[in-house]
Every structure is written in C-alpha cells, then in structure tokens.
Image (cartoon, rainbow, N blue to C red):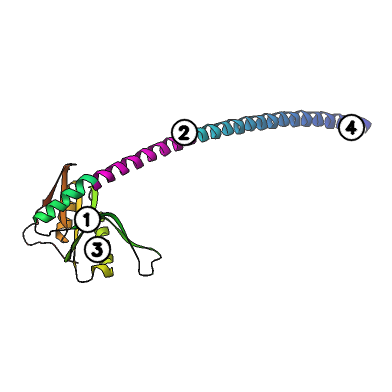
Amino acid sequence: MSELNAEAVLASIVELRESIVESRKETAELRASIAEQGKAIVELRESVAEQGKRMDKVLDELRVNNHRVGELTNKVGRIVEKVVVPNIVDKFNEKGFKFDAVSTNVEFLNEKKNGNLTEIDALLENGKFVIAVETKMDLSVSDVNAHIKRLQALRKVPRFKGKKIYGAVSTAIAREKPVNYALSKGFYVLQQPDVMAVRIIDFPKGHSAKAW
C-alpha cells in the first residue's frame, strides 16, 4: 500500500514538473508576444509621427498654393476691372444703350441693412436700363442659375424701380452648353477671346434679351 502511495506521489511530482515547464513555456511565449506587441506599438507611433510630418508638409504646400491662387484671382479681377469692363461698356453702347455709369464689385444690402442681398461683378446703368454682368473664366450652367437669382434680388432694390434690368455673363472659355443655356434664359453672353477683346454672341433665332 505504501509502495502505491509512493508511486502516486512520484507521478504527481512528475506531472507538477511538466505543468511548471509548460507554464514557463507559456509565460515565455506571453512575454515574447507582449514584446512583439510593444515593438508594433512603437512602430505604429513612429508611423503616425511620420504621417503627421507628411500631412504638415502637404498642408504647408496647400497654404502656399492657396496663396498663389488668391494672388492669381486678384490679378484676374484687376484685369477684368481695368480691361474687360471698359470693353463691355463699349460693346453695349454700340447697341444703343448709352451707359453713363459702370461700377465693379457692387454689393447690395437687404432691406434691413444688416446683410448682403447680392453682389454684382460689373454693373452698367443709365436712366432707363441696368445690365448686371457676371464674369467667369469658364462659364457653367450653375453660374447662369446663380446669376438668375442675383437678377431677381436686384429687382427688389428701390434704386432700380422703373428701370429694365438685363443679365449678362462674360466668359473667357465659351463652351456650347452653358452659352446656349444662358442665351435661352435671355442673357447677353460676352466672350473674351483674349484680355484685350470682348464680343457679344448673337442670340439664336427665336431668342432675345430678357428684361427682369
């Protein structure tokens, strides 16, 4: 009976040793896994930091480009104001309008004088007529729709009561779809073949300028 107990104890000791060995093995594997995960976390942090530096660089480049675009826009605006607008006036006067006043970048306040009603790139005016001109490098259909809303807003301005208001769009690039759409809405369409010239595109048969 004592021999059986000794064998059982010995078997238990052997089993315990194997369990300890297995436990140590699992512990070592766990430590290795934790170390690997720590390494991965460090690499991830370094990657995020690198991406952050790259993003900062991209943002800096965007700021520079936005500044350049802003400068280009201002230059285009000055060209429109000093060259294109006088040519527009001449072209409409050739049609008998006889405008005696032209303004650029004109803002109109709402009735309460606490907000902007609309803004017009170039406004030609005399005692009977008003032509509101929107200038674009590349006219689109949405630009025409936006200008319709401006004309509707101008109709509410007391200063223009009793005057006929016409719409006009000026574009350097005259693509067929937006140009035809503008003409169908009764807009004068002016093309800028170059910065020193402007021509008024003829209305197609069955269309004419619309007074708003």
Please state which of the two labelled residues, at mark 3 or mark 1, is closer to the viewer.
1
User: Does the magenta run of residues contain 66?
Assistant: yes
- What distance separates the C-alpha of mark 1 from that of mark 4? 118 Å
- What distance separates the C-alpha of mark 3 from that of mark 2? 44 Å
The span picked out in magenta is: 56-81
Q: Amino acid at mark 2?
A: Lys
Is the Cβ of the residue at disc 3 closer than 8 Å to that at disc 4?
Answer: no
Judging by the rendered image, the residue that carries numbered circle 3 is 151
Is the Cβ of the residue at disc 1 closer than 8 Å to that at disc 2?
Answer: no
Give residue 212's position: percent from left, percent from top. Answer: 20, 67
Q: Quick one: label 4 or label 2, which is nearer the N terminus?
A: 4
Characterize the local packing of mark 3: few (<14), some (14-19) or many (20 or more) Cα atoms within 10 angstroms. Answer: many
Is the Cβ of the residue at disc 1 closer than 8 Å to that at disc 4?
Answer: no
Residue at image coords 41%, 36%:
64
Judging by the rendered image, the residue that carries numbered circle 2 is 57
Judging by the rendered image, the residue that carries numbered circle 4 is 4
Instruction: Tell me the element at label 4.
Output: helix
Q: Is residue 17 left or right of residue 79?
A: right
